Amino acid sequence: MSFHYRDGVLHADAVSLDAIAKQVGTPAYVYSAEMLLDAARQFRAALAGVPNKQLLFAVKANPAHAILTLLAEEGYGADIVSGGELAAARRAGMPAHRIVLSGVGKTPNELAAALDAGIGSINLEHEREGELLSALAVARGMRAPALLRVNPGIDAGTHAKITTGTSDSKFGVPLAEALAVYERLSRLPGLALHGVAVHIGSQIIDLAPLETAYRRIGDLILALRHHGHRITHADLGGGLGVAYRAGQPDADVYAYGLMVTRVTRAWETTLLFEPGRFIAARAGVLLTRVLWVKPGARHPFVIVDASMTDLIRPALYDAWHEFAAVRPSGKRMIADVVGPVCESSDVFARAREIDRMVEGDLAIFHTAGAYGATMSSIYNCHALAPEVLVHGRRSAVISSRVEPAALRRQSLPDWFEHAPRAIRAA
Ligand SMILES: *Cc1c(COP(=O)(O)O)cnc(C)c1O
């Protein structure tokens, strides 16, 4: 049912956003369980043609415990990038064998924790990491399940800051070196190397770069087998995009499923998928209240209580989020929508036609369920916004507001007894 207007008021399922603002204040994230589950089921259905597969939610997109718990019940495992995400995935009930550790800077402690938890695969980003992982596994009398992440040298055609598969990107081993690196890693006593991984970027709508990347991986699998390697798994990463602007299409997940089925038909591997944004983005909105409407040189500024500390995507990636009133009057205005933070990049929309806003009005930023709350900060001593999950008529706080004082474990140096005097004496 999703986010829709009923009697002129925006609702998440059967709960009005007015009521949520009254209950938890603003800014606040609001998620629809139904939209989350719809996307998770749609992704699975689209891959019906792939006989052996594992679906892993990219935890970094939204690590909320309730969200991970729902996805675990849908049979999703986790793609994780840190020890913290390992703990989050395990706590949500995702079995260790359905967890894959990715990331270009895994620490020795994280590698050890992943081994000790018995996770399904560690995706190696470079050769030295493989050597360390092997040593850690040997010390434990085990062999570490591992895939080699390959950088196929492909521009995903998305924003530079979310592209990971070009040859100058920090991720993975260049395709040209992959065979030799795989060969050397396969001889290490502590590794059970069993395939390759690729992830070329995020917010991908045009499937052509993905298809090219997968074809290159298919050729590599043939070459590896030719050299006697047993390749049982291929991790195809995440990256499918969604529509952030009204009127634009989401990535066609069914076309994606058909493309994957076609390209990988002869691979004879279990395929791993790591969708993040596609599952979570549309299921969440950021609820905010208009603080002021301030005259500007060309357009008024609509100053809202949400900021880049709650949703950094516009400041970080020039991302667009649709902005809509909770109780639209039918009148429109052209305005800059900005947050209160003291940075000129704390801007959500410039010269945009939006619902007419006055002080005190409630509004939302759409499509904020992925890379939203999880990227928030306490800059300007802002609180972390609460998160609310809605299902039908029910709603619940799944993450409470955190005041910055609770996060800053602050103390004064003991030699600072009377600060001004201590400084004068120095
Ligand atoms: C971020 C990431 C994903 C998820 O990307 P989405 O665009 O959110 O689907 C999957 N795999 C890896 C290795 C990642 O780094």
Image (cartoon, rainbow, N blue to C red):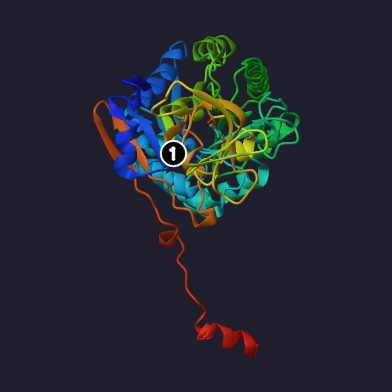
Mark 1 = which residue? Answer: 288
The answer to whether residue 204 is above or below residue 124 is above
Which residue appears at 52% of the width and 47% of the height?
Answer: 309
**The N terminus lies in quadrant:** top left
Residue 308 shows in the view = yes
Residue 189 horizontal/vertical position (percent) = 57, 44
Residue 2 shows in the view = no
Residue 118 horizontal/vertical position (percent) = 42, 42
Residue 253 horizontal/vertical position (percent) = 50, 15
| Mark 1 close to ligand 1, CB under 8 Å | no
**The C terminus lies in quadrant:** bottom right
The answer to whether residue 406 is above or below residue 129 is below
Report the image quarter containing ligand 1. top right
Can you name the residue that lies furthest to the left here? 393
The answer to whether residue 391 is above or below residue 81 is above
Q: Quadrant of residue 159?
A: top right
